[in-house]
Image (spheres, coloured by chain):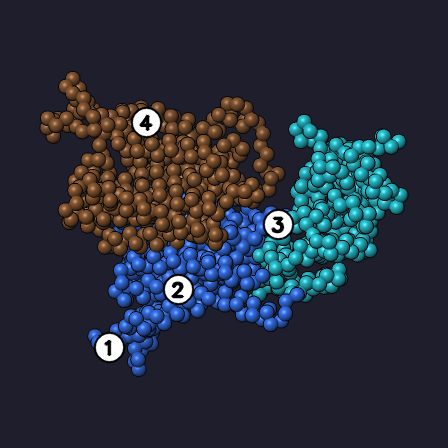
Amino acid sequence: MNTTGKTCQQNLIGEMGKRWVFLFLLLEFAYFSISASGYFSFDTVQMILFYGTEIFLLASAELFVIITGGIDLSVGYVLGFATVISSKLMVVFASLGISPIGCILISIVITLVIGLIPGFVNGVLVAKLRIPPFIATFSMLGITQGISELLMQGIPAKNLPILAGSIGNGYLLYIVPGQALSFFHRPDVPRGVRVYEIIPNVVVFAFLFIAVFAFILKRMRFGQHLYAIGGNIDAAARAGINVRKNLVAVYMLSSFFASLAGIIYVMKYITGKADAGAGFLLDAIAAVVIGGASMFGGSGTVWRTILGCFVIAVLETGLRMMGTPTFDKYILVGVILIFTVLIECFFSNFKK
Amino acid sequence: MRTSELSSRPGFTQTTIGRTVGRNWALFFLIFMVIVFAFTGSGFFEIANFQNIIHLSSTSILLAAAETFVIITGGIDLSVGFVMGLSSALAARIMVILSTTALPVPWIIILGSLAGLVISLIPGFISGTLVARFKVPPFIATMGMWGICNGITLRLCHGFFPIAGLPAALPELGNGYLIYIHPGKSITFFQKPEYLADNQIRELIRLIPFSFILITVVILILWFILHRHRFGQHTYAIGDNVDAAIRAGIDVNRHLVKIYMLSSFLAGLAGVYNVFQTGIGNYTTFSAMYELFAVAAVVIGGASLAGGKGRILGSFVGVLVLAVLKNGLAISGVEPFVRYIAVGVLLIVAVTIDQLFPDLF
Amino acid sequence: MGYIIETRDITKRFGGLTAVDKVSMGVNAGEVVAVLGDNGAGKSTLIKMISGVHRPDEGSILLEGNPMKFENPMGALASGIETIYQDLALAENLNVSSNIFLGREKTKKRFGLFNVLDHPYMLEESKHVLDKLDIHIPSLKSTIRTLSGGQRQAVAISRSIYWDAKVLIMDEPTAALGIAEQKKVLNLVNSLKSQGIGIIIISHQMYDIFEVADRIIVMRRGRKVAERLVSETDPDEIVGLIVGAETVKK
């Protein structure tokens, strides 16, 4: 038996092992606040949130799949697929004379429904045909890329409703100190008067979904079953969990989140293209791993994945504001990724 | 999913024909495609086109060969594409720097190439050590190296600028042929006939590109290592059952480090060759997805991501399947997006076949 | 007196191989029956038919006198036949109470809209069932990964018991355990027996069998070759039966 003193020490180190990402994030933020002038501000935080929205969504998507012990390589191109579909639809509906808000809403709904299809196929391939997730989702990557190119024919959609851009780049709350406070609408003020913009719309939109599914993952049966499948797929099956159905659902969920990210991309940048999400895959998976999830499945939480996203986003914005070439980010993300796993290994020795 | 009750499917796969087809379906499919494209695309079924296909896929073949070893051990190397970029950029950068000195051109090329090859051992050493000694999942270790190599490459490229200003001899070497035949007039080796004017170049028959010789040599060596040497036996043993390999006295950690270094080295070779082929130093873009296509080729070639299975020639056929598909569809006038879809569908079919014929490879 | 579970002439063939050939056996409530046999004798196949993994080609399985037809393991579970496999089938990343309730989680309605997991209830119930079996685990919130082999076995057993097992099938319950833990598991089997559950044990450990079993069934090449009361036999005879030396003896 251990002495209480040793146990206490072990607990402390174990706790540090769990919290180090948070500590690291604080250190990182402190470092950039000192090194990059103007970094330490509310606007920077908003900027991190705004530019990071797609990563937050894609990392959440990836997390669900990774919890079950799988991987989804297609999220980036499902994002692209969704940008192409939603932008094309908005243009088509606009040309039919539907009101802008109607165009946007209908397009979003249709895109989200169509966006479930790649995930459904992934899920069926993985669960029913027992194809390794790596291969199944890579195939789907190619297929969605091909379909996006087919729909686009080399020409990105033009003439999107202006409203889309103003929602995508708008804020939840505008405050003109001492004068006005308005939701969604930028108050008309003379030039030079400072308007405080609080929380970008897209961030609200994204975190609404992330919060709902974080809750489902943590508190509902579906979430519990995902962890069980990732922990021991045979045990889950023998305990009567419908493993196949759950796997199909999780890949659909992943695609759903990727489609959401695609819609947000369209609203932010008012364009859609097949390779819109090509560069996001490394960041999304890295965020999940930095957030402490195991690639073998069975662990990981939304909250810690979001922390992982922040680690990357703080780094990226920090480097940008310091004037360092942004491609240094790749080196640092790679290093952090490897160190995360090393640290987990190190601390897990103490936990025993 | 992984319960053993589901995997017993006797019948067709137990017949001799079934075995042969199942084991070599990629080769049969390749032949089938060649026949189909021979009818649908004019100019497909010609020696020049076949040489072209192999020449253009030589880097992919090297990357797939690299991936084969890692996949047989049950791992994966996501960094190959970016190690290739790193070697390409470093070799080019060194050559550019040396060009300012009085060094003769052959030395510039040799030193630059050596630098590219040597640097490529480092990422492999690091990811191998992480995987073997620190038990970091291969996916993450090599993904980390992906990021690091990519960042360093872009530094060498000063951002997103390919490195130009290299010796002009490079592309001639990289794109040269062993034999040049000017019908009825002359046969020369290594160089085209000097008297030939530019407008006569179309009359020339060129045979056996240097790239073909390079990959033939590499594949022969790797084939020997994998199928005729203890190193290969150990590789399969580790992929099949790590514990058994350890108990059998194989130094698994050391072996894994070697495997990842070999993988990385082959990626480096691809990078250096890429400089010879294009005459510039190239960084790797995200959307190229070299590493994923390499994995795809290896899987089409009959390997299993679970480890213990895979053949060098299988991976070679796997690359050719993808390359012929691309080339054939393009020559047949099919729109490029169809190719992406076709690759996806092909992969799914490949793995499904692998599931149906579980114990053949 | 009626058996709680009974097989009548059940047969299972795989291709040309008859894995189980017309085996009839029965277990009374509160009785431990051991199935013994060499590798390939058909023990596992017999057990798998009772637990619903395989469907018998011939013969019938009766639970409390009623013929049963299980389409899959879930059917057997629903009828109160619980199986503890050698690998225990626990999700190591989840905690004790989550494992006891795995696949059958208790939920409660929130805001009358959706069901959330009722962790307090599941913890409380898990505590009860562990107490009932006199099992001590430091914290029900600790993950299975942190438990010893014996504790894991105990969790697997508690899970079966919580779901009102009538029949409990145990496949090599002590195979992976240390000596002290083997003892605990055997005590556990004895306490289950006293609660009126019918237990079938597959084991290679002769000592275990004579410690807890009431009756022994010996199988060889798919057939039941002998049935003995533990009180009327000894390990030597059983070993002889397993290897096929009984004819010599007679």
Q: Check disc 3 and report its element: helix, strand or loop.
A: helix
**Tint of chain A:** blue
**Residue B37's mark?**
4
Counting residues from the start of the chain, the first of labels 3 and 1 encountered is: 1
Tag 3 and tag 2 share a subunit: yes
The residue labelled by disc 2 is A310
The amino acid type, in three-letter code, at marker 1 is Val
Kindly report the distance in space between the C-alpha atoms of the residues bearing marks 4 and 1.
68 Å
Counting residues from the start of the chain, the first of labels 2 and 1 encountered is: 1
Chain for numbered disc 4 = B
The amino acid type, in three-letter code, at marker 4 is Phe
Kindly report the distance in space between the C-alpha atoms of the residues bearing marks 2 and 1.
32 Å
Counting residues from the start of the chain, the first of labels 3 and 2 encountered is: 3
Between disc 2 and disc 4, the foreground one is 2
Colour cyan maps to chain: C
Kindly report the distance in space between the C-alpha atoms of the residues bearing marks 4 and 3.
49 Å
The residue labelled by disc 3 is A235
Assess disc 2: are there few (<14), some (14-19) or many (≥20) residues with their C-alpha within 10 Å of its C-alpha: many
